[in-house]
Image (tube, rainbow, N blue to C red):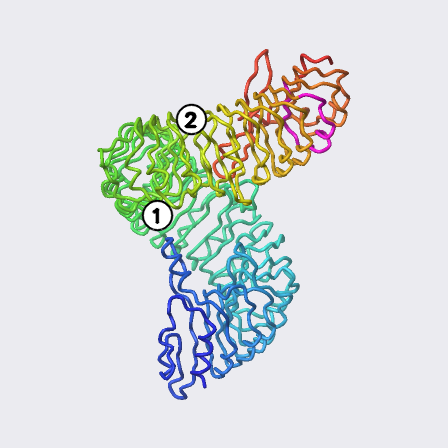
């Protein structure tokens, strides 16, 4: 009967990887994959079909293998015949959004049920509360960013699980659950509780904690917005505590010192502010401390202040320490060098101000030199030079000392760090040449030396043994890359960042072997050549391409129609011919300051897709002519359009009304005519509108004030506009720059100008406006008439205020 039930169960599954090939009729089901039977009764005790293939994958091939290994389909109710089963594990398969079946609540012999990460959605069935023998329940969902999740209106059904030791409901949507803690407090045997990413809110106060045996508590990534609950400090058996990213507030209470068994503590990304607490150094069992702040000022953040005490010497079991992005000052204590188990140190974003050689003396003098694998001291105000003591850190795999004030040479001895996988020395004042010993770092995967003062030649000898390199960033130095003709690199890069290096004049042929890259930055690389055809079809994983400014020649083929680039920057070159067709995947495109000619119809109107993702389009400073075509309905994601300094003429198309997301429109210095069209009324998000140096006529429309109330920059200079300035412009309270000079406007200056409050607001800091979501290439700009000349501003744009009205009859 049990064998037949399993065969019916198999029939409703999709097994693309043939995992269940041993499930054959007329054979002993106890010998089948995933089945374990009782040795005395012969009954099925365990059904374990968990997907264990690369659950934590690192490469695309591993991800594909993990996906292909998933079972899909339905959970058949035939397993109700497995009445003696105590263990069911269906984790990391894909049941395609089905609800967790109610009938699982009838398998009363179960003590283990794991449906983790298997794509279930909908209401968690209350019938699971019938499983009174259950000790472990894993209903952890898929990522909250991957679509709908399981949910529950209450957790009262948990009260029937009096034997429960481990409960994992992470990623389930429990937003509507009130008094969730009171229900969990009725589980006295609970040892592990995981409720991360559950959208939990208020924590009900507990007068008495019943789950005092709890050793693991994870309520991270919720939205509590309150002080740390006091009952946590009554959990004397806690070994692991994760409260990260849950908007807890206040100071760090001394109650943590009660948690003497604690081995792992994670408090990062909260609103907890205090001095680095003394009790931290009394937790002598601790192995992992994560009290990271935030590198972004607008995010919730833990901000620890003060100095790291020499009492850190008490934490002899410490393996991992992360105090990065806080407000710690002083010096790194020498006693940290005696922590022989310490493998990972992250202190970036603090202000220590020590000499580099002093810090490396601390880390290399004692047993820490052998144990240390990960060292992150980025942005900590370190100065000084490298000395030979770096060679003692032979086991380092990760070293980040970027964003400091380190000067001098990169030592040849750095080649002795043969275990190094990640090296970041960017943003310092290092000079001299790149040492040839770099070529000995055969484990190196990421090399980041950008924004220094390095000079000289980089040749194949620098990479001779670096076979695992996936990121090369030597941007913004004075380096020349010189390789033998026909050189084939030993590595396959994913990230190529060579901005402002000398790669030219020929286009670098060694790139021909790099077929896995996702982003390429060869901007300002002194290349004066045509782009070879092979380059456009190199990789199937393109994301970012920047070849501007160079002296690149020729036409751009329609390869871009099929390429997977999403961010394309080819400005300030010598490209000519028609604009290329682009794929619907492109989100940012900059072809400005070239010699593209012809009309835009074939470029904008050829697309058959209604899902074009283009957000930023910059075609300014070319030789484009003709009308702006009336097919804007195909490009409704546009936020920035810059077509200035071309030869465009005619009226603006009516289809511009579909550009409801538009924030910045630059059409200056063309020959556009007609009235300012009503189609712009729908562009309610416009912040910049520059129609200067055209032939627009008619009145300044009143709707410009009522509909475009977010305008910060308005340029209508040198047109043929007439009539009076409408009073409705008083709605433009955010306006900072307004230029309506050289028209034929009449009347008086309206009182509404007094409502331009943004012009009267004092600003104390420099700032710019940018729209790029990825690299910030698209800074907003505006032309301002001042001191008899016209100047373009971008970096200090938020500081600028201006009204220009001359050459009218006002």
Q: Can residue 755 be found in the magenta stretch?
A: no
Tell me the CA gap for discs 1 and 2.
Answer: 61 Å
Q: In front: 448, or 588?
A: 588
Q: Which residues are magenta?
A: 697-717
User: Residue 664's quadrant in the figure?
Assistant: top right
Residue 372 x %, y %: 33, 49
Q: Looking at the image, which residue is at 65% across and 14% down?
A: 742
Disc 2: which residue: 576
**Residue 429's spot in the image, x, y percent?**
37, 29
Residue 701 vertical placement versus 135 (above, below): above
122 horizontally vs 510: left or right: right
The image quarter in which residue 42 lies? bottom left
Depth check: 69 or 652 in front?
A: 652
Assign the C terminus to one quadrant of the image: top right
Q: Which residue is mark 1?
A: 337
Front one among 684 and 657: 657
Q: Of circles 1 and 2, which is in front?
A: 2
Disc on the earlier residue, 1 or 2? 1
Q: Is residue 699 magenta?
A: yes
SS for dot 2: strand
Q: Is residue 528 left or right of residue 770?
A: left
Rendering coords of residue 221 (x, y %): 55, 55
Residue 650 screen position, x and y as percent: 60, 25
């Amino acid at each position: 009967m049990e064998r037949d039930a399993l065969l019916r169960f198999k029939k409703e599954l999709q097994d693309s990887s043939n995992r269940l090939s041993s499930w054959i009729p007329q054979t002993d089901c106890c010998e089948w994959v995933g089945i374990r039977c009782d040795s005395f009764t012969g009954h099925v005790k365990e059904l374990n079909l968990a997907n264990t293939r690369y659950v934590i994958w690192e490469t695309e091939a591993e991800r594909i293998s993990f996906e292909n290994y998933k079972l899909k389909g339905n959970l058949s109710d035939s397993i109700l015949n497995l009445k003696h089963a105590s263990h069911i594990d269906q984790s990391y398969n894909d049941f395609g959004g089905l609800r967790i079946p109610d009938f699982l609540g009838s398998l009363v012999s179960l003590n283990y049920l794991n449906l983790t990460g298997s794509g279930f959605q909908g209401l968690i069935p209350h019938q699971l509360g019938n499983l009174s023998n259950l000790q472990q329940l894993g209903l952890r969902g898929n990522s909250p960013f991957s679509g709908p999740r399981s949910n529950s209106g209450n957790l009262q059904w948990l009260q029937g699980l009096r034997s429960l030791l481990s409960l994992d409901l992470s990623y389930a949507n429990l937003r509507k659950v009130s008094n969730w803690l009171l229900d969990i407090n009725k589980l006295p045997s609970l040892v592990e509780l995981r409720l991360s990413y559950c959208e939990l809110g208020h924590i009900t106060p507990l007068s008495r904690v019943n789950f005092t045996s709890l050793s693991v508590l994870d309520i991270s990534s919720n939205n509590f917005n309150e002080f740390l609950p006091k009952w946590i400090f009554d959990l004397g058996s806690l070994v692991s505590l994760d409260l990260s990213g849950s908007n807890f507030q206040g100071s760090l209470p001394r109650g943590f010192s009660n948690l003497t068994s604690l081995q792992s503590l994670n408090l990062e990304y909260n609103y907890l502010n205090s001095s680095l607490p003394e009790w931290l150094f009394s937790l002598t069992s601790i192995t992992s401390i994560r009290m990271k702040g935030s590198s972004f000022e607008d995010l919730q953040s833990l901000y620890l202040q003060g100095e790291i005490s020499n009492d850190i010497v008490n934490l002899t079991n410490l393996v991992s320490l992360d105090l990065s992005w806080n407000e710690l000052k002083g010096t790194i204590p020498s006693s940290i060098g005696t922590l022989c188990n310490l493998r990972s140190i992250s202190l970036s974003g603090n202000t220590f101000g020590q000499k580099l050689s002093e810090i490396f003396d601390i880390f290399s003098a004692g047993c820490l030199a052998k144990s240390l694998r990960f060292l992150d001291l980025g942005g900590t105000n370190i100065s000084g030079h490298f000395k030979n003591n770096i060679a003692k850190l032979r086991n380092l795999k990760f070293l980040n000392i970027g964003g400091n004030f380190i000067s001098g040479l990169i030592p040849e001895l750095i080649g002795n760090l043969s275990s190094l996988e990640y090296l970041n020395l960017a943003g310092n004042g290092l000079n001299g040449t790149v040492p040839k010993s770099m070529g000995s770092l055969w484990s190196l995967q990421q090399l980041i030396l950008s924004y220094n003062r390095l000079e000289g030649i980089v040749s194949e000898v620098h990479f001779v043994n670096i076979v695992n390199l996936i990121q090369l960033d030597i941007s913004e130095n004075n380096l020349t890359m010189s390789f033998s003709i026909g050189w084939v690199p030993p590595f396959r890069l994913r990230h190529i960042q060579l901005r402002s290096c000398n790669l030219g004049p020929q286009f670098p042929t060694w790139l021909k072997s790099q077929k896995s890259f996702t982003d390429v930055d060869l901007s300002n690389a002194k290349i004066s050549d045509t782009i070879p055809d092979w380059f456009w079809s190199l990789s199937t994983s393109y994301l970012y391409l920047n070849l501007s400014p160079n002296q690149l020649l020729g036409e751009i083929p329609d390869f871009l129609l099929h390429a997977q680039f999403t961010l394309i920057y080819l400005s300030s070159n010598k490209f000519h011919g028609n604009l290329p067709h682009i794929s619907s995947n492109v989100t940012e495109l900059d072809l400005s300051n070239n010699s593209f000619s012809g009309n835009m119809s074939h470029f904008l109107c050829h697309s058959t897709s209604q899902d074009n993702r283009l957000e930023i389009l910059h075609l300014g400073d070319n030789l484009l002519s003709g009308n702006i075509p009336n097919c804007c309905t195909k490009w409704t994601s546009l936020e920035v359009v810059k077509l200035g300094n071309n030869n465009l003429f005619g009226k603006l198309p009516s289809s511009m009304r579909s550009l409801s997301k538009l924030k910045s429109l630059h059409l200056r210095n063309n020959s556009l005519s007609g009235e300012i069209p009503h189609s712009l009324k729908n562009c309610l998000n416009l912040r910049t509108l520059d129609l200067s140096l055209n032939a627009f006529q008619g009145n300044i429309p009143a709707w410009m004030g009522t509909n475009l109330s977010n305008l910060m920059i308005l340029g209508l200079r040198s047109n043929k506009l007439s009539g009076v300035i409408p009073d409705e412009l008083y709605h433009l309270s955010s306006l900072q720059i307004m230029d309506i000079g050289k028209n034929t406007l009449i009347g008086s200056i309206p009182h509404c100008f007094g409502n331009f409050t943004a012009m009267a607001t004092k600003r104390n800091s420099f700032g710019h406006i940018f729209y790029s979501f990825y690299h910030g290439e698209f800074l907003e700009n505006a032309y301002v008439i001042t001191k008899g000349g016209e100047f373009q501003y971008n970096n200090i744009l938020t500081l600028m205020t201006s009204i220009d009205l001359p050459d009218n009859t006002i």
